[in-house]
Image (cartoon, helix red, strand yellow):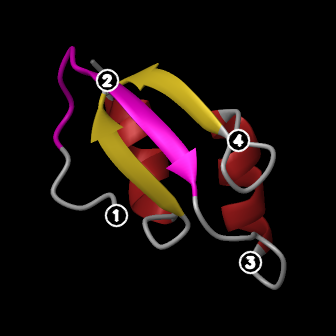
Amino acid sequence: MAKNLIPSDVQLEITQIKSAIGGKQNQRDTLRSLGLKRIGHTVVRTADAVTVGMLNTVPHLVKVEEAK
């Protein structure tokens, strides 16, 4: 879950763990903006203010880990 994130230079691995079907349009749009296309898809993004804001919109649909 994406909770208590703060903007920094850390790389985050973001994985979609739940479907956007039945969700609000802004949540579906946020997942697409993050680059997530399907359940299990993972992207690596910098934890800047924009990304953290998007993750706070869909914390129940994604899993966030620090990239190695």
**Which of pointers 2 and 1 lies earlier in the amino acid sequence?**
1
**Which of pointers 2 and 3 lies earlier in the amino acid sequence?**
3
Report the amino acid beneath label 2. Ala
Relative to residue 65, is residue 38 drawn left or right?
Answer: right
Q: Are marks 2 and 3 in contact (CB under 8 Å)?
A: no
59 to 4, vertically: above or below: below
Mark 2 closeness class: few <14, some 14–19, many ≥20 residues within 10 Å: few
**Structural distance between the alpha carbons of marks 2 and 1:** 15 Å
At 80% from the left and 44% from the top, the residue drawn is 37
Looking at the image, how many numbered discs can be counted on the residues? 4
At 43% from the left and 65% from the top, the residue drawn is 59
**Which of pointers 4 and 2 lies earlier in the amino acid sequence?**
4
Q: Secondary structure at mark 1?
A: loop
In which quadrant is the C terminus drawn? top left
**Which of pointers 1 and 4 lies earlier in the amino acid sequence?**
1
The residue that label 4 is drawn on is 36
Mark in front: 2 vs 3: 2
Q: In which quadrant of the rendered view does residue 9 lie?
A: top left
- Residues 41 and 56: in front is 41
At 32% from the left and 58% from the top, the residue drawn is 2
Mark 4 closeness class: few <14, some 14–19, many ≥20 residues within 10 Å: some
Report the amino acid beneath label 4. Leu
The residue that label 1 is drawn on is 1
Mark in front: 1 vs 3: 1
**Structural distance between the alpha carbons of marks 2 and 3:** 28 Å
Q: Examine the structure image and report whether residue 67 is included in the region drawn in magenta.
A: no
Residue 33 location (% of width, % of height): 70, 37
Q: Examine the structure image and report whether residue 13 is included in the region drawn in magenta.
A: yes
